[in-house]
Image (cartoon, rainbow, N blue to C red):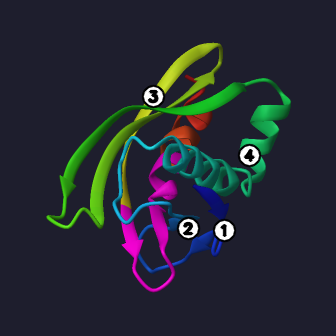
Amino acid sequence: MLFNFIAQTARFSLPVLAIAMLTACTKEVECNDRDTKELAVNLIQSYLEKAQWYNEARERNIITGDAKIEDIKTLSVSDDKKNAVCEANYTFTFRKKDRSIDFNYGLTYLEDSGDIEVEVDANRIKANILGLFISGQ
């Protein structure tokens, strides 16, 4: 799959969702697809990097290393395999300790463009990391 970033973030009155598209080679979505996971972590990172406190924490080596998405689970998938809800752990290093935040992401195959939409609630992850930052844990 090739990266085809159509939108980075979409703002709603509820939590902020990060949304992007992948050009699909198949008409089926899969939670554990390498490109899908890479796009999800890139969406989360680009959302986090908009926060000054996050960038300062990286500069001061409070948050180090590369974040990953691990422990992928498929919570549900439509019969036609064009929609899925996935669960994973966003893992990162904070104050030299490995941390993990569970989150859900959605996948949708867009029939007209052939892209796969990846939707992540990046605000949930940001709030959890900010809580760690503020509490000094």
In percent of the image, x 37 and y 39: which residue is there?
88
Residue assigned mark 1: 5
- Proximity of marks 2 and 1: CB atoms separated by less than 8 Å: yes
Magenta segment includes 72: no
- For the residue pair 6 and 96, the one nearer the viewer reads as 6
User: Which stretch appears magenta?
Assistant: 107-126
Marks 1/4: CA–CA distance: 26 Å
Residue assigned mark 4: 53
**Residue 21 position (above or below residue 72):** below
Which numbered mark, 1 or 4, is in the foreground of this view? 1
Which numbered mark, 3 or 4, is in the foreground of this view? 3
Q: Position of residue 128 (x, y in %)?
A: 48, 42
In percent of the image, x 20 and y 48: which residue is there?
75
Name the residue at the right extreme: 59
Residue assigned mark 2: 21
Q: Secondary structure at mark 3?
A: strand
Task: Using residue 105 as the reference point, say whether residue 21 is left or right of it.
Answer: right
- Proximity of marks 1 and 3: CB atoms separated by less than 8 Å: no
Q: Residues within 10 Å of mark 4 (few under 14, many from 20)?
A: some
The quarter of the displayed image where residue 46 is located: bottom right
Marks 3/4: CA–CA distance: 19 Å
In percent of the image, x 40 and y 81: which residue is there?
111
Q: Position of residue 40 (x, y in %)?
A: 53, 50
Marks 2/1: CA–CA distance: 5 Å
Task: Using residue 4 as the reference point, say whether residue 59 is left or right of it.
Answer: right
Residue assigned mark 3: 100
